[in-house]
Image (spheres, grey):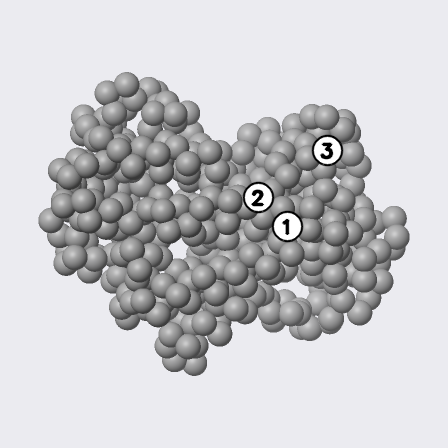
Amino acid sequence: MSITRRNFIKAAGATAALLAAGPRLARAADAYRVVVIGGGFAGATVAKYLRMWSGRPIDVTLVDPNPAHTTCVLSNLVLNGRMRLSELQMPLSRLYTNHGVTVLQDTAVTIDAAGHRVELATAGWKSYDRLVLAPGISFDELPGWDPEKLPHAWIAGPQTTLLRQQLLTLRKGDRFVMTIPEAPYRCPPGPYERACVVADMLKRLGGGKVTVLDANPDIVAEKHTFDTAFKTIYKDIIEYKPATLISSIDSAGLAVNGIKGKVVNLIAPHGAPALLKTAGLTNGRWAPVNPLTYETTQLAGSGIHVIGDSCAAPVQPKSGHMANSQAKVCADAIVRYSLGFDPLADKERTANITTNSACYSPVTYSEASWLTANYRYDATQDKMVLTTPTPGEAPKWDGENFEDMFTWASNLFTDSFT
């Protein structure tokens, strides 16, 4: 299928392929218990589909410290006032109302893998047959970094509001400084998208500078779109500095690497949260998994799965759409386990493992671009691979893409949280 705007809209509405055996027709043992940690795109989706595909006999408990998930998807539009943060808040109570998922507003503090139990800060120990970890990301502690002065706004919520308030102080001629961590990081095109959003704001004010300190040697995602935007409509505003690691931070002086800004957006290096690290589930920053089930490869036979941004899934980007897609592969595997079947032994299933990722990127106040990629499991390489040589990218940014962005996001929000 050639990649056109209309084909993209169709692909963006798709999710992980429904796998061959049809787990929704089966019924699992009533006593089978699954605990899900984290209520973002990955955690909410896996909890919802475990209930849907099992015919609801699986007892699913979702644990998250917040009553609603605030999505990073579209959050850059809060910065320029196109959206309100409240529009991005997804109540987790819908998972109980619509699907019977037990939702606990609590925090996981310890994993006892051998005992098949997890300790919650308020509720204490909770036993499980399967544990799904989808806790998102945590940031490195950098010397001199005060996130209240140099916000990251890479976990949507109060930090988004803080950065928005700081951006409202910008005037003609001011400088905005931002950093981009080494890949892989959450939302590959997101930082470049943000640079464009702020550059557009300064352009409307009469001019200024956006200095982008990118730890990567080149633009990580949507290179055609952002390289073109940086060199054309924002050529007098955006200063792009690749291969630039953070060497110094002055939070009080609002400076990174000696470059002072009126507003500084420091997106720090990040990885899986400490909960996974202390449980021995990580190898470096992220948690390695088997892409056929998303079970940890660090603790074989533990019944622990890791999905979303926390997992190490080479090639597959860390995006909300990908988290939703991985969650369905994981849910399918757990339903099969609950019925006494080994999903790894099903060759027809293995041959049909697919995931996909799609996103839109606002480039101006009313125009956007898009990026999409599809992946399949390659048994010869024992890993997920792109189904095309490169991800698909919009040939240009325009107003139609901007309008389609909200349809895509609404579909993704509904599929994950409703």
Name the kind of residue labelled 2 in the image: His
**Helix, strand or loop at disc 2?**
strand
* Classed neighbour count for the residue bearing mark 3: other residues with Cα under 10 Å, few (<14), some (14–19), many (≥20): many
In this picture, residue 25 sits left or right of residue 1 = right
Say whether disc 3 or disc 2 marks the residue closer to the N-terminus.
2
The image shows a total of numbered marks equal to 3
Q: Which mark is residue 69?
A: 2
Q: Name the residue under label 3.
A: 118
Distance from disc 2 to disc 1, alpha carbons, whole Å, reads 9 Å
Residue drawn at x 37%, y 77% as measured from the top left: 4
In this picture, residue 327 sits left or right of residue 250 = right
Q: Residue 342 carries which label?
A: none
The picture quadrant where one finds residue 396 is: bottom left
Q: Please tell me which residue lies in front, 58 or 158.
A: 158
Name the kind of residue labelled 3 in the image: Val
Q: Name the residue under label 1.
A: 44
Say whether disc 1 or disc 3 marks the residue closer to the N-terminus.
1
Question: Where does residue 322 sit, x and y in percent of width and height?
Answer: 51, 57
Label 1 close to label 3 by CB (< 8 Å) = no
